[in-house]
Amino acid sequence: MSVLTAFMRGVTRLNDFVGRWIALLIFAMFGFLLLEVGFRYLLNSPTVWTNELTQMLFGIYAVMSGGYIMAHRGHVNVDLLHSHLVPRKRAFMDIVTSLVFFIFTLALLWFGIDMASESISSWETSYSAWNPPIWPVKLAIPLGTGLLVLQGLVKLLEDIAIAFDLDYYTPEDNESKGEQL
């Protein structure tokens, strides 16, 4: 079972690493928007690229942060029943509902790979006045979704261990448990 535990920890560490670096894009987006405001209102000379670049960076930020958010239990839950259950019953419920998660994320991964490969093969650009390449943004969709699927697998393995009282995982092993973001 140590291989399984190592896999689970490795995926969580990878998502933690990616998420912390992706979070730094906020500063770039903030800087570009301030630059645009400065050029537009102080110099009366708006740029053609800052808004589009900020939107592309935000797209990458949004899709690449899913695994990190899941690793730190930051996704929204409908808590009407979930929060009132004991951990073991909650884990059983999460196992059943993970089917919906995997259907959605695997479909997103499948179509994201198709969309990204098509975009890369044509070196797709935005066709705007600035006309930057957008294939890197589309490539982020299957990459981020892949990280999210892997973290979802880790969550499912944790839930199985809790539900069936298996020894490869104990709640104390979850390094991100209780961390305030």
Image (cartoon, helix red, strand yellow):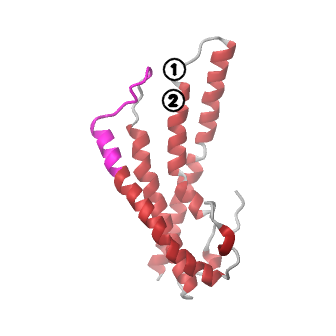
- The quadrant in which residue 80 appears is bottom right
Residue 37 is labelled as none
Q: Nearer the viewer, residue 42 or 19?
A: 42
- Judging by the rendered image, the residue that carries numbered circle 2 is 52
- Queried whether the magenta region covers residue 116, the answer comes back as yes
Density class for disc 1 (Cα within 10 Å; few <14, some 14-19, many ≥20) is few
**What residue lies at 50% left-to-right and 36% top-to-bottom?**
56
Up-down relation of residue 158 to residue 113 (above or below):
below
Q: Kindly state the secondary structure of the residue where label 2 is placed.
A: helix
Residue 48 is labelled as 1
**What residue lies at 55% left-to-right and 26% top-to-bottom?**
50
Up-down relation of residue 41 to residue 32 (above or below):
above
- Report how far apart the C-alphas of labels 1 and 2 lie in the structure: 8 Å
Give the image location of residue 91, x and y in percent: 58, 79
**Any part of residue 55 in sight:** yes
Q: Nearer the viewer, residue 94 or 5?
A: 94
**What residue lies at 61% left-to-right and 84% top-to-bottom?**
88
Give the residue at the far top of this rendering.
44
Q: Give the range drawn in magenta.
A: 113-130
Up-down relation of residue 96 to residue 108 (above or below):
below
Q: Are discs 1 and 2 less than 8 Å apart at CB?
A: yes
Task: Tell me the amino acid under the disc marked 1.
Answer: Val
**Any part of residue 177 in sight:** no
Density class for disc 2 (Cα within 10 Å; few <14, some 14-19, many ≥20) is some
- The quadrant in which residue 74 appears is bottom right
Give the image location of residue 100, x and y in percent: 47, 67
Give the image location of residue 146, x and y in percent: 43, 58
